[in-house]
Amino acid sequence: MAGEASAEAARKSTQEVLEREPEFPVPGDERAAAFFDLDNTVMQGAALFHFGRGLYKRKFFDTRELARFAWQQTWFRLAGVEDPEHMQEARDSALSIVQGHRVSELQSIGEEIYDEYMAERIWPGTRALAQAHLDAGQRVWLVTAAPVEIATVIARRLGLTGALGTVAESVDGVYTGKLVGEPLHGPAKAEAVRALALAEGLDLTRCAAYSDSHNDIPMLSLVGHPYAINPDSKLRKHARQMDWRLRDYRTGRKAAKVGIPAAAGVGAVAGGTAAAIALHRKRR
């Protein structure tokens, strides 16, 4: 009897905690939105590397360059972190490959590559989180260092509001092999999100952000609801210290016994801001 009474008391206590926890995301809150990193957060691996595979299939470059892309992707998946040197090398390779090609051509090819290499690599758990925000009537953006053309395709296929990404320069619709500003990475993401929030009339304290990388701590720290998704070791440690929510979809079990919505104990700036404002204006 004592055991039954103890179990019943524990059940009531848990229920009271759940009832006290506010509903999230909040339905109908038009000043709230969600911002999702892409690589290893929404999708397994790096979008840029998958894009490279698709371009190789279409003979944009040779076998030696494919081997470099394959090595970078393998390293990225095993390490699970965004190493600046590896990411810079990948961006330089991609820029040299697309130089001289038309923007419209790459956009069309991007649709095909999504179906071939990316669709099956979307994390169902993260996709469900994004859908929860959409179902609540909130806007959802991808915010990524990947090329904005790739990010836009993925966002559209997932039914998201839009995407902020690294912008490659084009003149008369042809890629020049240069960037507009700097890659949307690290602190630049935070500035891009801040600029977008200002343009859209969002209250960042009511917004959510999701990422796997400690490089995105500046973006995660901006919002009232930060989430560490498939976190690297540095982000996991920081999230626990800050009492941020964690989700890990890389194994069949919940990492650190976390689940929705319980907590688990838990130049670049200018380029990023310019990209955010330019995309906002284009969408308008």
Image (cartoon, rainbow, N blue to C red):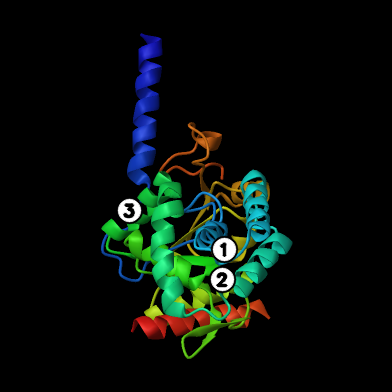
Percent x, y for residue 100?
Answer: 55, 81
Compare marks 2 and 1 and give the one earlier in the sequence: 2
Disc number lying in front (1 or 3): 3
In the drawing, does residue 230 fall left or right of residue 121? right
Percent x, y for residue 194?
Answer: 51, 76
The residue at 70%/60% (across/down) is 86
In the picture, residue 87 is in which quadrant?
Answer: bottom right
Kind of residue at disc 1: Ser
Can you see residue 115?
Answer: yes
Q: Which residue is mark 1?
A: 221
Residue sitting farthest toward the bottom: 172
| Residues under numbered marks 2 and 1 in contact, where contact means CB atoms less than 8 Å apart | yes
The residues bearing labels 2 and 3 have C-alpha atoms spaced at a distance of: 23 Å
Can you see residue 206?
Answer: no
Please determine whether, in this image, residue 82 is positioned above or below residue 268: above
Q: Residue 95 versus residue 242: which sits nearer the camera?
A: 95
Task: Tell me, for residue 132, which label it has, or none.
Answer: 3
Q: Which residue is mark 2?
A: 190
Compare marks 2 and 3 and give the one earlier in the sequence: 3
SS class, disc 1: helix
Compare marks 1 and 3 and give the one earlier in the sequence: 3
Report the number of numbered marks: 3
Q: Residue 97 versus residue 74: which sits nearer the camera?
A: 97
Q: Check the picture and name the quadrant holding the N terminus.
A: top left
| Residues under numbered marks 1 and 3 in contact, where contact means CB atoms less than 8 Å apart | no
SS class, disc 2: helix
Kind of residue at disc 2: Ala
Percent x, y for residue 281?
Answer: 40, 86
SS class, disc 3: helix
The residues bearing labels 1 and 3 have C-alpha atoms spaced at a distance of: 21 Å
Residue sitting farthest toward the right: 85
The residue at 37%/55% (across/down) is 130
